[in-house]
Each structure stands twice: as C-alpha cells, then as structure tokens.
Amino acid sequence: MALEMKPVQVRLPDDAFAALKLLSDIHDKDLGEIARELLTKMLLGEVHAAKIQAARFARATAGDNLREGAVERGSGGRK
C-alpha cells in the first residue's frame, strides 16, 4: 500500500543544494527522494519537540496555578 504524498517545491541556497546533491550521490538516491526523507525527519522531529515543550509548559503552569490557589485560600502559605 503506497502512501499518498503531497507535492512541495522549495528553493535552496547553493550550499544547501550542494549538500543535498552530495547526500543524494552518497546514498545513490534521487534528489527528491533524499530531500523528502530529510524534510520528513526534520518536520516530525520539530513537531515532536514542540509537543513535548507544550506538555512541559502545561504541567508547569498547572502546578503554579495549584500553588497560587493554595496560598490564596490560606492553606500552605506563611504570613
């Protein structure tokens, strides 16, 4: 079963294109195939990192909100 893929067109600086060409030659793969593999890894990695960061932020702020509520109610704060 083949995956359905969406077409994307990008313009690369000369040094990035040279790097892509080198990787394409090393791995004996088409430029588009190696670009797709690299872009997929990068995008999925970035999204994964963003999700982890969002979860950490949510936990951190939830903990702060709980502590603030306890202090406001007088159960845990010193005066």
Image (tube, rainbow, N blue to C red):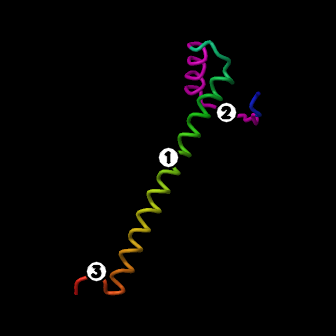
Q: Inspect the magenta stretch and tell me whether residue 14 lies in it.
A: yes
Q: CA distance from mark 1 to mark 3?
A: 35 Å
Which span of residues is magenta-colored? 5-26
Q: Is residue 34 left or right of residue 2?
A: left
Residue shown at 63%/23% (left/top)? 34
The numbered mark, 3 or 2, whose residue comes first in the sequence reads 2
Q: Residues within 10 Å of mark 3 (few under 14, many from 20)?
A: few
Residue shown at 47%/53% (left/top)? 53
The residue that mark 2 highlights is 11
The dot on residue 37 is none
The numbered mark, 1 or 3, whose residue comes first in the sequence reads 1
Viewer-nearest residue: 28 or 56: 56
The residue that mark 1 highlights is 49
Q: Residues within 10 Å of mark 1 (few under 14, many from 20)?
A: few
The residue that mark 3 highlights is 76
Q: CA distance from mark 1 to mark 2?
A: 25 Å
The numbered mark, 1 or 2, whose residue comes first in the sequence reads 2
Q: Amino acid at mark 3?
A: Gly
Q: Is residue 21 left or right of residue 6?
A: left
* Front disc: 1 or 2: 1
Q: Amino acid at mark 1?
A: Ala
Say what secondary structure mark 2 lies in.
loop
Q: In this figure, what is the number of numbered marks?
A: 3
Asked if residue 9 is positioned above or below residue 18 in the image, the reply reads: below
Q: Amino acid at mark 2?
A: Arg
Q: Quadrant of residue 15?
A: top right
Say what secondary structure mark 3 lies in.
loop
Say what secondary structure mark 1 lies in.
helix
Quadrant (top left/top right/bottom left/bottom right) for the N terminus: top right
Q: CA distance from mark 3 to mark 2?
A: 58 Å
Residue shown at 43%/67% (left/top)? 61
Q: Inspect the magenta stretch and tell me whether residue 19 lies in it.
A: yes
